Amino acid sequence: MADLRRVSGIALLAGALLAAGPMLVSLAVAQLTVTADDRFAGLQWTFARVKYNSYTGDARTDLRVGYWEEPWAIDAPAAEQNLTRRLRTVTAIEVTEPVVLTLDDEKIWQYPWLYIVEPSNLQLTDKDAETLREHLLRGGTLTLDDFHGPYEWALTVQQLARVFPDREVVEIEPPHPIYSCFYQLDKYPQVPGLGSFFSGRTWEKGGFVPHLRGILDDNGRPMVLINWNTDMGDGLEWSNAEDYPGYIKWTAMAYQMMINQVIYTLTH
C-alpha cells in the first residue's frame, strides 16, 4: 500500500453552517472565517467511520445492527454528512461520500483517515489491533471522539495499549501547529454534547477539562488524535438544527477544531 497520506486533501471551511437555514447562517458568519483557497485541488478526503465490535468473543459475526443501535454509530449519519458537505462546498478537493468500515474490511487500506466515536466501548480483537497498527504506521490517522471522564479514559487507553504497547499518549497543546494550520485557536475547545448543553454545562461524566492528546510515530506525526472530554460529533451533527440557535457557537468550535485536525493530518 502506498503512503496513505498521498490520497488525502486539505479542507477549508466557508460558512460552516451554509445549509443550516437563514437564521443560523447569519449567526454562523460571525463565528467562522470564510476563505477561498484552491491550493489543494486534485487531492482527496473521505470520512471513514469505523464500525467496531463492542461485544466480547465472536459476537462480531452475529452483529446485525443499524444506526443508533450501537455506540459506533452515535451522531451518524448526520455528523459525517455535514462535515463532508462543508468540505465539498468550499474546497477544490475531491471529497467522496462517507463510508462505514470494519477493521477487517479489505477496503480499509483505501481510507487513510479513520474515525471512532465513543472509543470507551471499543473492544479490539488481536487481529483488529494488528490491522490498526499497520494502517497507522503506513501513514494513516485515527481520530477518537466523544468520551469523557477518568473511567472512559482508562477503558480507551487499555485498547490503545493493544495497538501500541510501546508508545506513550502525549498532550497536543498550543503552540502545536494543529492549532494554527488554518484557524487560529488559542486553546483546545470543550464542545458540549446536546444533553450537556440543555443542562447548562459543557462537561459530562466528570470530564471537566478538555484535552487533545495523541500517539506519535517515530517522526513525531500524530497517528492517533484523541478528543477527550469534548463532543465534536454532536457539534457536527446538530449544526443544521434551527431549533437550537444557542448551540451555534459550539458548532463553530467543533468545525474549527475538526477542520484544523483534518488539515494538519493531511499535510503531515
Image (spheres, rainbow, N blue to C red):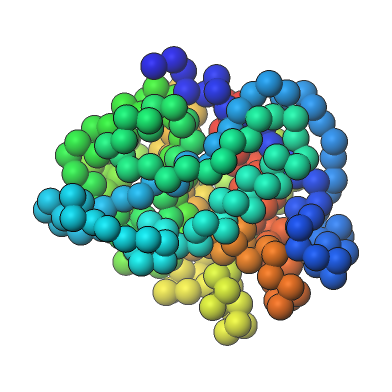
Q: Residue furthest left?
A: 57
Q: Position of residue 21 (x, y in %)?
A: 80, 65
Placement of the C terminus among the 4 image quadrants: top right
Residue 154 makes an appearance in the image: no
Left or right: 62 in relation to 50 = left
Q: Residue furthest bottom?
A: 199
In this rendering, is residue 104 above or below 252? above
Residue depicted at x 66% and y 30%: 94
Left or right: 95 in relation to 130 = right
Q: Quadrant of residue 214?
A: top left
Q: Nearer the viewer, residue 63 or 2?
A: 63
Residue 144 makes an appearance in the image: yes
Q: Position of residue 28 (x, y in %)?
A: 81, 61
Q: Quadrant of residue 20?
A: bottom right
Q: Nearer the viewer, residue 32 or 204?
A: 32
Q: Nearer the viewer, residue 158 or 259?
A: 259
Q: Nearer the viewer, residue 52 or 152?
A: 52
Residue depicted at x 75% and y 53%: 16
Q: Position of residue 127 (x, y in %)?
A: 19, 36
Left or right: 34 in relation to 74 = right
The total number of labels drawn is 0
Residue depicted at x 63% and y 49%: 83
Residue depicted at x 71% and y 47%: 86
Q: Quadrant of residue 216?
A: top left
Placement of the N terminus among the 4 image quadrants: top left
